[in-house]
């Protein structure tokens, strides 16, 4: 049992770190809890950075994950603007970038992920941005000029959400996507078509098969040079080409790393004193039947609760069905499950009316559902997938069929 003389250090002050710290107290941790983060502010919600914060519908004071008083009341301490540079598992201490060392009894890695950099000529020019932190979002906001030209490199969720927000702020926006279609790695062609159409309706230009090869300008970016001799004028370039998990600390400390810090279903690494949670972990999921790394808030928060329980000597397995969301213009997308390995897609509703569901199936099983402005179906999809219910393609496709009635009347397989 944890005693009041023990210290738990948490590396990373974001979604996973904040949740882990407060959950530790709830699980009965009596000793010191210290969260060390290299950003300079207390944990904040990242999703609004490309949405309501970027459009100024919310300001920085409205996106705290928890109010400062919640941490104070739970006696959670923060050390911010400081980076952990090494973990010494033998002596159970970490080294900070200011040269200090701190001892721990238990340690949690909540180091998340960082943006993948596009190191093409001109990448250092002013006016070239990435979007991961509050500071990044504020720098983009300061550079917005209504009527100015923004080029976004990468047609994934972050790129498309940023495109929608910059359009709202009155910029002329072009999205460059290297693949055949936007969101190609994560959705079916029907969704890519829908999002391309949605953005074009709002005046965003989407160019596929477009690879940014160089950024040009005199001190400040002025244009993007692409393949096929295409050149686009730009006052601002935002690069959104994915993230890389921050696993170097764990790897250097001899912990197992494989597309993330390897943990078990209780969010524990191979070291019984070290847990890990959030974007940085490669974890098992028995609802899905395979290991994966996720980049999502619900994953970070729920896995952190398991990690906190484990560090206090309790066992709470983390096996939640993954879910995710994205907001662009008036389209609220909610995704239940993972579509990996699907053999067909069934549509329910009408994309042209901005309300539909794409069901991803394999054999008779539903793997995932992308629900556009369809909150009811999203909730139903979660149940169908988690309970392995079998529903025919015809019923899934027909908006007149009451899925709730089928679910409650249909025995699990
Ligand atoms: C613009 C944007 C929009 C998003 N939208 C959505 C959305 O709509 N829905 C959704 O589910 N998810 C969304 N996400 C993803 C979501 O934000 C992440 O899944 C979530 O932040 C993961 O939380 P985390 O705590 O695991 O890691 P992170 O949020 O990456 O936090 C890790 C923290 O640890 C710090 N750190 C790393 N190494 C060290 C070290 N050695 N020493 C000290 N500190 C360290 C990092 O600087 C960072 O502050 C979005 C992300 C972004 C950037």
Image: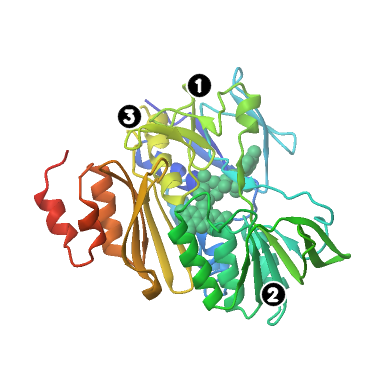
Tag 1 secondary structure: loop
Tag 3 secondary structure: loop
For label 2, the crowd category at 10 Å Cα-Cα, with few meaning under 14, some 14 to 19 and many 20 or more, is some
Q: Locate residue 48 relative to residue 346 in the image: left or right.
A: right
Q: Are marks 1 and 2 in contact (CB under 8 Å)?
A: no
- In the picture, the quarter occupied by the N terminus is top left
Tell me the residue at 71%/34% (across/down): 100
Image position, residue 234 (x, y; %): 76, 70
Q: Give the residue pinned by disc 1.
A: 271
Q: Give the residue pinned by disc 2.
A: 144
Residue 255 drawn above or below residue 84: above
- CA gap between label 3 and label 2 equals 48 Å
Residue 168 drawn above or below residue 156: below
- The answer to whether the residue bearing label 3 lies less than 8 angstroms from the nearest atom of ligand 1 is no
Q: Give the residue pinned by disc 3.
A: 315
Color theme of the render: rainbow
Tell me the residue at 84%/53% (across/down): 121
The residue lying toward the viewer, choosing from 406 and 50, is 406
Badge 1 or badge 3: first in the primary sequence? 1
Badge 1 or badge 2: first in the primary sequence? 2
Q: Is residue 43 visible?
A: no
Residue furthest front as drawn: 228
- In the picture, the quarter occupied by the C terminus is top left
Image position, residue 373 (x, y; %): 35, 68
- CA gap between label 1 and label 2 equals 47 Å
Q: Is residue 23 visible?
A: yes
Tell me the residue at 38%/46% (across/down): 322
- CA gap between label 1 and label 3 equals 16 Å
- The answer to whether the residue bearing label 2 lies less than 8 angstroms from the nearest atom of ligand 1 is no
**Which of the 4 image quarters holds residue 154?**
bottom right
Tell me the residue at 53%/58% (across/down): 157
Say the numbered circle drawn on residue 305.
none
């Amino acid at each position: 049992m944890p005693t009041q003389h023990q210290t738990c250090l948490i590396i990373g002050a974001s979604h996973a770190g904040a949740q882990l710290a407060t959950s530790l107290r709830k699980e009965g941790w009596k000793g010191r809890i210290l969260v060390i983060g290299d950003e300079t502010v207390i944990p904040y919600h990242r999703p609004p950075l490309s949405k309501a914060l970027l459009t100024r519908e919310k300001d920085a004071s409205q996106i705290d994950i928890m109010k400062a008083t919640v941490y104070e009341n739970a006696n959670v301490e923060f050390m911010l603007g400081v980076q952990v540079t090494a973990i010494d598992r033998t002596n159970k201490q970490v080294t900070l970038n200011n040269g200090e060392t701190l001892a721990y009894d238990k340690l949690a890695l909540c180091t998340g992920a960082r943006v993948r950099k596009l190191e093409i000529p001109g990448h250092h020019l002013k006016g070239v941005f990435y979007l991961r932190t509050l500071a990044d979002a504020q720098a983009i906001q300061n550079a917005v000029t209504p009527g100015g030209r923004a080029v976004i490199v990468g047609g994934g969720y972050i790129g498309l959400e940023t495109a929608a927000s910059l359009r709202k702020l009155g910029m002329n926006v072009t999205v460059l996507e290297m693949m055949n279609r936007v969101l190609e790695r994560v959705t079916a062609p029907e969704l890519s078509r829908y999002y391309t159409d949605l953005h074009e309706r709002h005046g965003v230009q989407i160019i596929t098969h477009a690879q940014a090869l160089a950024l040009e300008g005199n001190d400040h970016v002025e244009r993007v040079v692409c393949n096929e001799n295409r050149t686009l004028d730009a006052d601002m370039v935002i690069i959104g080409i994915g993230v890389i998990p921050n696993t170097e600390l764990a790897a250097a400390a001899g912990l197992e790393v494989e597309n993330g810090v390897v943990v078990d279903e209780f969010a524990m690494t191979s070291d019984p004193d070290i847990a890990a949670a959030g974007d940085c972990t490669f974890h098992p999921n028995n609802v899905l039947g395979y290991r994966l790394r996720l980049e999502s808030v619900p994953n970070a928060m729920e896995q952190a609760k398991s990690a906190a329980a484990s560090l206090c000597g309790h066992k709470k397995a983390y096996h939640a069905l993954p879910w995710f969301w994205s907001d662009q213009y008036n389209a609220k997308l909610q995704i239940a499950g993972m579509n990996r390995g699907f053999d067909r897609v069934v549509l329910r509703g009408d994309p042209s009316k901005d309300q539909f569901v794409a069901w991803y199936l394999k054999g008779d099983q539903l793997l995932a559902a992308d629900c556009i402005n369809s909150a009811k179906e999203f909730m139903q999809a979660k149940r169908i997938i988690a309970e392995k219910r079998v529903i025919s393609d015809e019923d899934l496709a027909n908006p007149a069929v009451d899925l709730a009635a089928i679910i409650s009347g249909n025995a699990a397989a």
